[in-house]
Amino acid sequence: MSLQDTSQVSNCSAMSDVLNRIGDKWSVMVVGMLGRNGTLRFNELKRLINGVSQRMLTLTLRNLERDGLVTRTIYPEVPPRVEYSLTALGKTLEGPIGALWDWSAENHASIIEARSVYDARESAATAEEPRRIAYARG
């Protein structure tokens, strides 16, 4: 199926459904880290992904597993060892996510600069606007 024709409701729904999962920050980070590092344990992933909480990582891994992008392997040891890795479907995301990471790294400085220019322009425009004073009718 091709998602070229966005006038088709089913195509928009499919795109929305997929982007809701893989478009969030933590899913991109998890898939990226597993793609770059291979099989990882939970705490290894948590250390590699700056700022993710234990709860958010758990939810993200659960959702990625549900969607067939990540596999969870439990080893019957004491304490139990749990490892995560990309499935064959998850590995198909390595290229697009890798390209996104590379693009981000290459263009981050330009984006920061553009934000500064925009913010300065907005601050100047706000300062120049005449103040509107509301008078209460008595």
Image: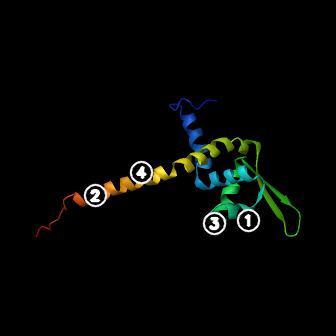
Q: CA distance from mark 4 to mark 1?
A: 36 Å
Q: CA distance from mark 4 to mark 2?
A: 15 Å
Q: CA distance from mark 1 to mark 2?
A: 46 Å
Q: Amino acid at mark 1?
A: Asn
Residue bearing mark 4: 114
**Where in the figure is residue 26, as x and y percent of width and height?**
62, 56
Query: Which of pointers 1 and 2 indicates the residue nearer the eye?
Result: 2
Q: CA distance from mark 4 to mark 3?
A: 30 Å
Residue bearing mark 1: 43
Q: CA distance from mark 1 to mark 3?
A: 11 Å
Q: Amino acid at mark 3?
A: Ser
**Where in the figure is residue 52, as x and y percent of width and height?**
62, 63
Count neighbours of disc 2 (C-alpha within 10 A) and say few if under 14, some if 14 to 19, many if 20 or more: few
The residue that appears at 73% across and 65% down in the rendered structure is 43
Q: Residue furthest left?
A: 138
- Tag on residue 53? 3
- Tag on residue 124? 2
Whether 14 is drawn above or below 107: the answer is above
Query: Which of pointers 1 and 3 indicates the residue nearer the eye?
Result: 1
Asked if disc 1 and disc 2 are in contact, CB closer than 8 Å, the reply is no
